[in-house]
Image (cartoon, helix red, strand yellow):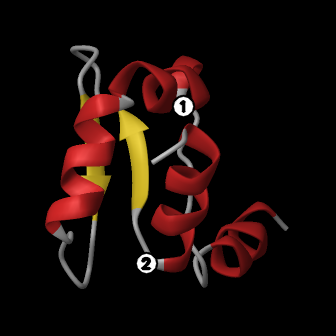
Amino acid sequence: MTPWALYLSLYRAGVSYWQTPDGKLGYKAPNGLTPELRTAMRDHKADLLFLCSGGMTVYSKGQEAAERNEAA
């Protein structure tokens, strides 16, 4: 799976992810992770951490609207 395909798959699967204070990848997967997604996340961990570096959380489908409402 390419990184781009992984980002889309995580978004569509409802998986949000972030960098924990100790530099690890944290995630929330309300419906769980398929073995394919789990493997792809492990394979592309550095890419995912880069996307959420500096305290940025990458929100999944359906969560971004709630996040915008909090900022308003």
- Find residue 11 and report its horizontal and vertical position in percent: 55, 68
Horizontal side of residue 15 vs 9, given as left or right: left
Horizontal side of residue 62 vs 33, given as left or right: right
- Residue 16: image tag: none
Distance, label 1 to label 2, CA atoms, is: 18 Å
Q: Which residue is mark 2?
A: 13
* N-terminal-most mark, 1 or 2: 2
Q: Considering depth in this image, is 47 or 19 the residue closer to the camera?
A: 47
For marks 1 and 2, give the one nearer the viewer. Answer: 2
Horizontal side of residue 38 vs 49, given as left or right: left
Residue type highlighted by circle 2: Ala
Q: Which residue sits furthest right?
A: 72
State how many labels appear: 2
In the rendered view, would you say 38 is above or below 40? Answer: below
Q: Secondary structure at mark 1?
A: loop
Report which quarter residue 21 is drawn in: top left
Horizontal side of residue 22 vs 56, given as left or right: left
Mark 1 Cα shell of 10 Å, populated few (<14), some (14-19), many (≥20): some
In the rendered view, would you say 44 is above or below 30? Answer: above
Q: Secondary structure at mark 2?
A: loop
Residue type highlighted by circle 1: Cys
Q: Which residue is mark 1?
A: 52
Residue at the spot 46% in from the left edge and 63% down from the top edge = 10
Report which quarter residue 40 is drawn in: top left
Residue at the spot 34% in from the left edge and 28% down from the top edge = 45
- Find residue 22 and report its horizontal and vertical position in percent: 21, 14
Report which quarter residue 31 is drawn in: bottom left
In the rendered view, would you say 58 is above or below 49? Answer: below
- Find residue 2 and report its horizontal and vertical position in percent: 54, 42
